Amino acid sequence: MKFRQKLQVPFEFDVVFTRDLFASANETIVGTLPVDQDQRRFAVYVDRGLLDHFPSLLARIGDWFAAHRSKANLVAPPFIVPGGEAAKNDRDIVLGIIRQMQDLGLDRHAYVMAVGGGAVLDAVGLAVAVFHRGLRHIRVPTTVLSQSDSGVGVKNAINFAGVKNLIGTFAPPFAVINDAMFLTNLDQREWTSGLAESFKVGIIKDAPFIEELEALAPRLVARDLDAMERVVIRCAMLHLDHIRTGGDPFEFGAARPLDFGHWSAHKIESLTKNEVHHGEAVALGVALDLYIASRLGKISTAQRDRVCRAMEACGLVLWHPILESKDSQGVLSVLAGLEEFRQHLGGRLTLTLPDGLGRKREVNEMPPALVEEGIRWLRDRARAPVASR
């Protein structure tokens, strides 16, 4: 005897763009909360790296909750979490967050706010998703990359056994609040590297976005906040549109278009022990896959070169010597990323490549000879005078 049970569970969450979120007069957080809820208990986790640039942040968060005590109750002073990949490489951090939530007596109607970069959002988000099978998670992304990509998605994960995002969940947040003011004090490396995800999504979904990035390049390099906010919003909307309309928000299928360029990027991160940051690795991976797409006839060499020049005009670097590293058998180390990516997909290898700028197509193989050829092309291109690229 067989019964087929079909459940449909709609998910809704607000993605809000604001400035100076923790100013006492800013009502953005309150505006995301249900009006008919009596008890609104909050725990807040803050990326340690933020405090170097915003030393008054913890006090401002405390002052904001004090000013809105009747609408949002902060149950403990904000907790501090290590930033960067350190947050994702140590599972004890996730277990520590779970213990803190248990000590506070948080229940499924409580709110846990994470303020920080994508790695901190991932670690806190995983803890929140598994504690009592899920509390209400409010993300406050603070980097270009997290505001435009990872912070607005539905995934949480940590690294394990040297594999990127091996342990994780699909758990939509309760809300996402992007505060552009957090971008003002990013170091140049983080300001620039986050733009890789904008190129990634533009290449496969929105060719006019590439044109906009080209036009805005001088302002982006000059750290124009209005220009960056414009890019972040457009990139976030493209990611949200794909998650909402792509038909596979929890990635049960074989294809993951938003991971274009990521099969090698994830491996580059692990090979360098995260010396190469995620956005920097994505830039390398996108450039490599652009070359391969051009050799397979899916984009022209003119389109490939144009996008690579635009990426460099925005400050992205398209070469790193780790691409040439080989294992003990003399095989390019980065090629191991293909098998890891296949396992992550759960079956047949399916990679997304552009099919003309602004469109995509899935392929099921990546010829190692083309990968090696593409790496040589990136190396030779990096050594050539800028005027000849």
Image: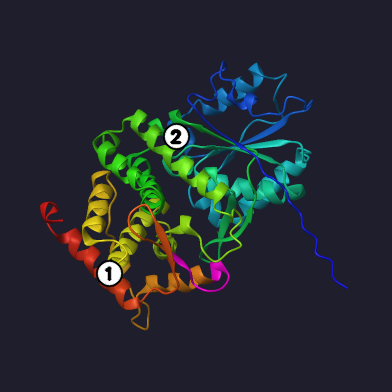
Q: Which mark is residue 56?
A: none
Percent x, y for residue 41?
73, 31
Task: Evaluate if marks 1 and 2 touch, with contact meaning CB atoms under 8 Å apart.
Answer: no
The residue wearing badge 1 is 295
The amino acid sitting under disc 1 is Arg
Q: Quadrant of the C terminus?
A: bottom left
Query: Disc 1 versus disc 2: distance between alpha carbons?
Result: 45 Å
Let me know if residue 317 is in the magenta part. no
The answer to whether residue 113 is left or right of residue 180 is right
Q: Residue at x 27, y 33 (%)?
A: 219
Percent x, y for residue 276?
37, 56
Q: Residue at x 51, y 49 (%)?
A: 242
The residue wearing badge 2 is 52
In terms of image quadrants, where is residue 73? top right
| Residues packed near mark 1 inside 10 Å, few (<14), some (14 to 19) or many (20 plus) | some
Q: Which residues are magenta?
A: 343-351
Let me know if residue 349 is in the magenta part. yes
Q: Residue at x 54, y 57 (%)?
A: 89
